[in-house]
Image: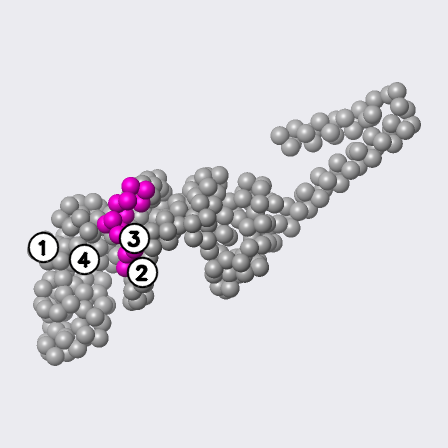
Amino acid sequence: MMRNNNNNNISSSNNSNGEVLSCNIQHKLPSGDSPYVRAKYAQVVVKDPDAAIVLFWEAINAGDRVDSALKDMAVVMKQQNRAEEAIEAIKAFRDRCSKQAQESLDNVLIDLYKKCGRLDEQIEMLKQKLHMIYQGEAFNGKPTKTARSHGKKFQVTLRQETSRILGNLGWAYMQQYKYANAEVAYSKAQEIDPDANKACNLCLCLIKQALYAEARSVLDDVLQNKLPGSDDPKSRTRAEELLEEFEPCQLKMDSLNLEDAFVEGLDQLMNQWTPSRSKRLPIFEEISQCRDQLAC
């Protein structure tokens, strides 16, 4: 699993201690010259992912900031389309990481399963995370945690995390065409922390189950800007695309209503002509039976 690539380029690029210190400060990298520090330098400054992966391996084997090294290496591997290798690395070396790092590694592992299309394993891990929240074990027992996105730190509450996990669970079920399961997950997510993106996904689940009235009600909340994120251009565009899917559905429903009215009108007409006879001619009985079978 270990790659013995030559890392001389990284060492030679660090000729000036002043230059390295300046880069470390600029990119908020740790100080020093350990394998992990050199791995981060290769990843962030030199932008050599292959060299970074080798140095992350070196850090893990040397016991140098193993928590961060394993997680960062897996992320770089995913970016290099080596997600399967990253999964095996986490499974093999997570026992060297602290208890506090396990939840973060789980999140990386879930993303890797998603990347590889390993839906059953992704779903199982998402359920485990929900169970941890229920047992009060998430966030290491704290009500919030600090997350990072695009270099910025922010606080995440348990409610937000629960909704996020349920949304991911709904997405995974959708990939398996289990729309009823996905509907339950998205509905629960919306009850906890609603947003326009999950509403669009819930709407699609309902459409796939031919629950058009419920789907339209969910979509209207986005179109009428009732949910956070409704003004986001991507969510808006998606909502408008989903709205177009209602047109053929509405035509189908209108057609059925027209047929019902037509048959009912004929019933009344035949009843007026010959009250003692059957209300429908044989051909209309056949039409009605076929319609009922299709409805079933």
Which residue type does callout 2 highlight? Gln
Residue labelled with disc 4: 68
10 Å crowding of disc 2: few (<14), some (14-19), many (20+) = few
Which residue type does callout 4 highlight? Ser
Residue drawn at x 51%, y 60% as measured from the top left:
230
For the residues carrying marks 3 and 4, which lies nearer the camera in this image? 3
Return the mark for residue 146.
none
Residue labelled with disc 2: 155
First in sequence, mark 1 or 3: give its number.
1
First in sequence, mark 2 or 4: give its number.
4
Left-right relation of 134 to 37: right
Q: Is residue 43 above or below residue 166?
A: below
Residue labelled with disc 3: 143
Q: CA distance from mark 3 to mark 2?
A: 10 Å
For the residues carrying marks 1 and 3, which lies nearer the camera in this image? 3
Q: Are marks 2 and 4 in contact (CB under 8 Å)?
A: no
Q: Are marks 2 and 1 in contact (CB under 8 Å)?
A: no
Camera sees residue 27: yes
Left-right relation of 158 to 223: left
First in sequence, mark 3 or 4: give its number.
4
Q: Are marks 3 and 2 in contact (CB under 8 Å)?
A: no
Check if residue 144 falls in the magenta segment. yes
Q: CA distance from mark 3 to mark 4?
A: 23 Å
